[in-house]
Each structure stands twice: as C-alpha cells, then as structure tokens.
Amino acid sequence: MDTIEVIKNWIDKESQVLDLGCGDGNILNILTKELGVTALGVEINQENLNECINLGLNVIQQNIDEGLSNFSNKSFDVVIMSQTIQVLKEPKQALLEVTRIGKESIVTIPNFGHWATRLNLLLSGRMPVTGALPNNWYDTENIHLCTIKDFEVLCSECGIDILEKRFFNGSGKEKGLTQIVPNAFAATAIYKISK
Amino acid sequence: MDDSLDFVEASKITLNGSLDLECGKTLKTVELVYETYGSLNSDASNAILICHALSGNHHAAGKYKGDKRPGWWDSLIGPGKAIDTNKFFVVCPNNIGGCHGSIGPSSINSETGDYFGPDFPIITVKDWVRSQAMLSDCMGIDRWHAVVGGSLGGMQALEWSRLFPKRIKKAGIIAAAPKLSAQNIAFNEVARQAIVNDPDFNEGRYLDKNTSPKQGLKLARMVGHITYLSEEAMRSKFGRELREEKLNFGFDAEFEIESYLRYQGDVFSENFDANTYLIMTKVLDYFDPASECNGELADAFKSIEAQILVVSFSTDWRFSPERSKEIVNALIEAKKNVSYLEINSPHGHDSFLFNEQDYVKGLASFLKN
C-alpha cells in the first residue's frame, strides 16, 4: 500500500476534505473521483492553481504562513497536509491550525532521521543531499525538516493525539526495517492526528 | 490567441412583460440592446453572459465596421481566447439605465413622450439581473454555462448565482467586492457632486434644455479614472513627465498625467450620459447582499449552487484582494464551490481588462470544465 492508498483508507466516502498545500491537486482529484469527497485545496503556486482548476477542483490561492483564520473550527471532516509542513515558517502553528480546522487530520512528513540522511551528514560533513532531499541547503524550500521522533514529540507537546501512523521506505513500501526502526529507516511518515 | 472576431453588430429586443424594480417603480416596456458572439448549440448549454461595469456597454468584443478599436473585453473574448467564441455563445447586453441603446435616462418615456432624464428610476444590481433573466427567456437560454463580469459586472455575476441558482452553472467574479466601502462611496459622491453642480446639468433635464453637463461628467470620469489605475501603473506610464520640457508656472496641463486625465475626461463626456453615470454610481453604492441577512455574507450565499471563481489583482486598490477574499471566505463558510486567484498585475483595478497570462489561463480553465 502506498501513501495515497493509506490516505484513501483513512477517509470516509463523501467527507469534506481540505488539502493545505494541495500542489497540482493529485490527491484531491483521486479522493474526489474514488470517494466522492467534497474537496477544497489551498495552494500558492500559480501553475499548480491552474492545474487544479483544470481538473475542476475548488482551490484557493492563499499563503498558509499568513494564517488560516478564514477556516472555522472543525469545519472539515479531514484536513490533509502532505509534504508541506517542512516548507512552512511556523510548522508548530500550522499543526495547531490543521488540528483546529479538521475533525481529523492527515499529515505526511519526510523523515530527516532516515539512515541515508544521517550517513550523508556523517561522511560528508555537509548538509545532506539525497534522493528525497535533492537540493542544497541554500536553495531548498525545506526550512523546517524534522525526524519522526521530533514530529511525535511536537504532537505530544501540542496535546495532539496520534490516532494512526504508517511508515514507508524510499520506494514507498512498508517493508522490513522501516516498520521496526522507522526513525532510521522510513523515508516518509504519515500520521492521522486530532486534537 | 490573437484571433479577433469578424465585424460585429448590435441587436435590439423588447423584453416580454414589464419589470418591477426594487425601488417600487415599474418599467412597463424594457428595451435592451445586446451583442452576441459565437453560436448557441442545439441544447442551449454553451451560453455565457457577460455583465459590464460602470461605464461599459454591450460592445464587449470585435469591431464595428469602420472602427479601429474593438469592444472593451476583446482581450478575453474571441476565437481561442479565454472566453472562447469557438466553443461558447457569448451574450453581452447594455444594462437598463445605460446610455448605449437600452432603456435609460436618455430614452423617451413612452407615457409622457419626453426624455426620462432625472425621472428614470434608480436601478439596483438585482434589477439588472432580473432584466438579464428576462433576456435569457427571450433567447431560449434556460441555464447559462457561466455568467462573468469584472468590477460592477462581477457583482452582477454574484447576484445571478444568488438569485437564480438553477439558471447558472458557473460564475466568474472578477475584481469585485461584496459591497462598497465608505471610501468607494466617497469617490462616487465626488463624481456625483461634480455632475449635479455643473450649470449645464439643469437638474437632470439637460436634454430638454439642449445643454450638456460635460464639465461635470469630465471631472467625474477623471476622479473615477484615478481609482482604476494603480500608483505603480501611473508612475511607470507618466511619472512626472512634462509635456514641454520645462515648467511654465501656470495652470495649463503641464504634466503628462494631467493631459491624459483631461483627454480621458473629454472623450468620456462626449460619449456618456450624465444621468446614467449618476444611476450607475448608485447601483454600486446600494449593492450589499449581506444587508439582507443581518450583515452575514455567508447567509446571503445560502442559495448559491454555481461553481464560483473569484479573481483579484495585486495592485487593485479600488476593490483590493482583501475585498475579494471577503466573498471567498463567506463562500467557504457557506460550504459552496469556490476557487480563488490573486493575480500579480501592475494595472490596478483595470487589470481585469488586460490579457494577464495567469488570469486568462485560470479563467479559461474554469470555463472549460
């Protein structure tokens, strides 16, 4: 099962779904077609916005870092934030907002604790550049990377409950050591959380 | 994308029945002038209604024979353009109260045989939308694929989606606002005062007296025009350029911006009716759907079923992006289908008339689906 399959399994049919940082609308498009959800995306990149509109999705041009106060408490069944939290200026605030707006939330993060990242830093002595994190420190959008442990500590500090979690290796598979020592072997983690 | 329409012509129609206006008066016969581009398909499902803004009219696209300049939205309407006349049947009427052929203050009142002049009733956005619905009936269009407009035109598109939810599939609300601010009303009031205090205004009966309040209308347009442009656009277009290369220590138009505004005002005052201008500004001032629901905009949007695209422009200070976001956020709260684009453009409020790539692409994608 890949991440999108997991997300699909965690969302009820015909739910109201908000995807913060929806990109080109891929996830929302699948959820709309296969689960009949009512979807709304939030995105900042103009080309992505146009892609979403092209797919017939509802999408709002909005900078998440400038706040989400226009979304009221528990106004969506599910809020998705996939591979987005690490590019935000205030990830903690965003996490609190996500769990305020959604009855449940699904957050996907790249795991900075992955062994390849650790090894890269250990051997080269420079900020890791890997398949999952392909850019140099000075031109990466990822300004707030964290490990799986870090994320779970933040959730606990914020009083956010982790309802479910799944871990994937670099090929998007839930295999072997990824499941035993996720903080060292998972490339991606996906959480269902609520507050 | 550069294709233009062949020569276009306007049509005139007398609507079936009278129109009861929001002010309590009735227009017994309603004559509308309009243009169409493209062809209506067999199930009449490809029609797009274009709503014009304050000083606009039915000539939205293409050229009249002998004209050099095309209609006011030719950048967006035509074969292969955002509002693609190869796919869509596009209709643009001149609104009632206007001065380009539809019934308005400069029309003859059939009951008295005189010009309506200042006796023409004050119109509202709702009245316009109802008259446009009557036009739809006459044209055999049960449901518009889309209703699209900029500025005051966007307000009509919004009102359409509220008033006739079953008759509109999509609404394009561009550079609009859910109501005017005190500052917006203030600018309108300056324009109105300029007109009514022109000695040639004659309390609105200037057509009977064979005068024309051109000075007032010119001033009104000059003030309005400033609010349509951004500071940035004015600076880059005119800066502090002088017409002659020196200061003349006088009060003639010395700076290019002065001469530009005077010219725009002069052209406008030759081609527009002062009473129409007064009415149009009132239509703007009165528009406030939330007022019907104790100020709750989201409640005012309850009836909406259309898919809505709201577009704003970064340098628009007349109806800034914040004003568009009020519409968007109320639609989100009301759980309606809404998309929102905030386009970077240097042209201020007038941006909606320009062929800005992200804007045109977004609108085209929205209409296509």
Image (cartoon, coloured by chain):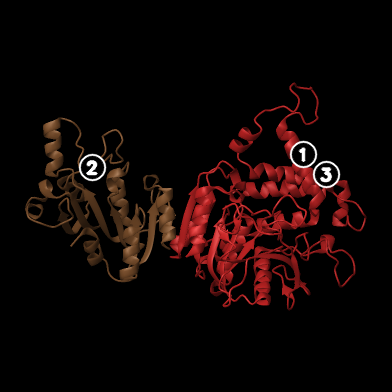
Label 3 to label 1, Cα distance in Å?
A: 10 Å
What chain does badge 3 belong to?
B
Which residue is drawn at the image coordinates 57% and 60% (left, top)? B83
Q: Neighbour class for label 2 at 10 Å: few (<14), some, many (≥20)? A: some
Which residue is drawn at the image coordinates 74% and 22% (left, top)? B245
Q: Quadrant of residue A78?
A: bottom left
Q: Which residue is mark 1?
A: B262
Label 2 in the same subunit as label 3: no
What chain does badge 1 belong to?
B
Q: Which residue is mark 2?
A: A133
Residue flagged by tag 3: what amino acid is it?
A: Gln
Asked whether the beta carbons under mark 2 and mark 1 sit within 8 Å of each other, the answer is no
Tell me the element at label 3.
helix
Tell me the element at label 2.
loop
Is residue A92 among the parts visible in the rendering? Answer: no
Percent from the top left, x then y, of residue B22?
Answer: 69, 69
Residue flagged by tag 1: what amino acid is it?
A: Arg
Percent from the top left, x then y, of residue A149?
Answer: 15, 46
- Residue B215 numbered mark, or none: 3
- Disc on the earlier residue, 3 or 1: 3
Percent from the top left, x then y, of residue B330?
Answer: 48, 60
Q: For the residues carrying marks 3 and 1, which lies nearer the camera in this image?
A: 1
Chain identifier for the brown-coloured part of the image:
A
Asked whether the beta carbons under mark 2 and mark 3 sit within 8 Å of each other, the answer is no
Is residue A140 among the parts visible in the rendering? Answer: yes
Which residue is drawn at the image coordinates 85% and 68% (left, top)? B109
Q: For the residues carrying marks 2 and 1, which lies nearer the camera in this image?
A: 2
Q: For the residues carrying marks 2 and 3, which lies nearer the camera in this image?
A: 2
Residue flagged by tag 2: what amino acid is it?
A: Leu
Q: Neighbour class for label 3 at 10 Å: few (<14), some, many (≥20)? A: some
Q: Quadrant of residue B71?
A: bottom right
